[in-house]
């Protein structure tokens, strides 16, 4: 179905006092068609059109057989596609490409700001400028990232809820990739060596190994949740033991 928002009518000629036109129909933002007098159909690709030596985009329309409609009129064999039409469609393609992989688009600054998650970083693009961040900063109890490189009036930007949620998930996954067991100390009572997980485990992972941990409290050298079964815990969680 042709998108009515991208239809363009190109005026080719006049008959008497009445303007006659041939309709150029956009198939999408990348191609268009012109229909001939007997139903001829030819597809044109925007990016295949090249300007002539005068910088004009000329399209041959001899194939259209327009004399079927106007047998007594001397009709042109070509017409100039307005550059402004092609430029508008080119801009639409550029915006489509920017929006394709964006997880969010904001218009708070007057022009669109695009948010992308790439590997373990958040990239923000505003016009020709962009910044990347590998962390979330809490400013005034809000989740933000530094945007000094975007040239706007403030140094930090509050993240939209969905962006903050997705970015936090990425950062949490990154942390888990670096998870390991670290030596905590040797018990003075039984000589067992105890190890701690160096980061807080998410509930679903903690449930897998909590039976292998003992909680130590007080002012002794061993404190918190520790395990004397590091090999077992490491195998279950798929993490290394520091120093081994």
Image (cartoon, helix red, strand yellow):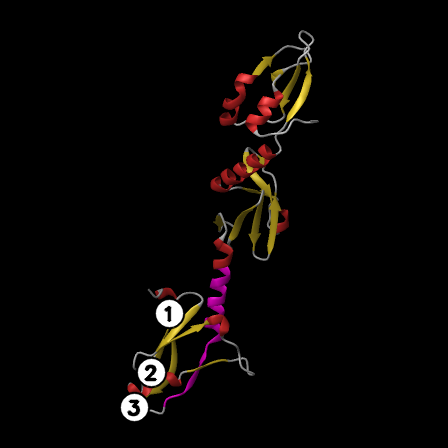
Q: Position of residue 225 (x, y in %)?
A: 59, 17
Structural distance between the alpha carbons of marks 1 and 2: 18 Å
Q: Residue at x 53, y 82 (%)?
A: 52
* Disc on res. 7: 1
Q: Which quadrant holds residue 221?
A: top right
Q: Are marks 3 and 2 in contact (CB under 8 Å)?
A: no
Could you tell me what secondary structure mostly forms the magenta stretch? helix
Q: Position of residue 136 (x, y in %)?
A: 58, 38
Residue under label 3, please give it: 71
In magenta, the rendered stretch is 75-95
Q: Please tell me whether mark 1 sits on a helix, a strand or a loop.
A: loop
For the residues carrying marks 1 and 2, which lies nearer the camera in this image? Answer: 1
* Disc on res. 163: none
N-term mark: 1 or 3: 1
Structural distance between the alpha carbons of marks 1 and 3: 27 Å
Decide: is 55 above or below 130.
Answer: below
For the residues carrying marks 1 and 3, which lies nearer the camera in this image? Answer: 3
How many residues crowd around disc 1 within 10 Å: few (fewer than 14), some, or many (20 or more)?
some
Structural distance between the alpha carbons of marks 3 and 2: 16 Å
């Amino acid at each position: 179905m042709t998108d009515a928002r991208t239809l363009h009518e190109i005026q080719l000629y006049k008959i008497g006092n009445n303007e006659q036109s041939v309709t150029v129909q956009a198939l999408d933002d990348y191609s268009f068609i012109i229909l001939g007098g007997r139903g001829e159909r030819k597809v044109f690709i925007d990016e295949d059109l090249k300007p002539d030596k005068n910088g004009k985009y000329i399209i041959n329309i001899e194939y259209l057989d327009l004399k079927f409609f106007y047998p007594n009129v001397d009709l042109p064999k070509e017409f100039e596609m307005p550059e402004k039409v092609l430029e508008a469609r080119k801009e639409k393609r550029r915006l489509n490409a920017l929006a394709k992989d964006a997880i969010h688009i904001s218009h708070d600054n007057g022009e669109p700001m695009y948010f992308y998650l790439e590997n373990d970083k958040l990239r923000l693009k505003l016009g020709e400028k962009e910044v990347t961040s590998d962390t979330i900063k809490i400013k005034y109890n809000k989740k933000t990232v530094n945007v000094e490189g975007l040239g706007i009036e403030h140094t930090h930007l509050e993240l939209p809820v969905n962006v903050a949620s997705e970015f936090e998930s990425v950062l949490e996954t990154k942390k888990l990739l670096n998870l390991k067991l670290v030596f905590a100390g040797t018990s003075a009572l039984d000589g067992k060596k105890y190890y701690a997980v160096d980061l807080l485990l998410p509930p679903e992972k903690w449930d897998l190994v909590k039976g292998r941990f003992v909680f130590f409290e007080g002012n002794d050298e061993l404190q918190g949740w520790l395990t004397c079964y590091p090999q077992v815990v490491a195998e279950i969680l798929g993490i290394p033991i520091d120093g081994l």
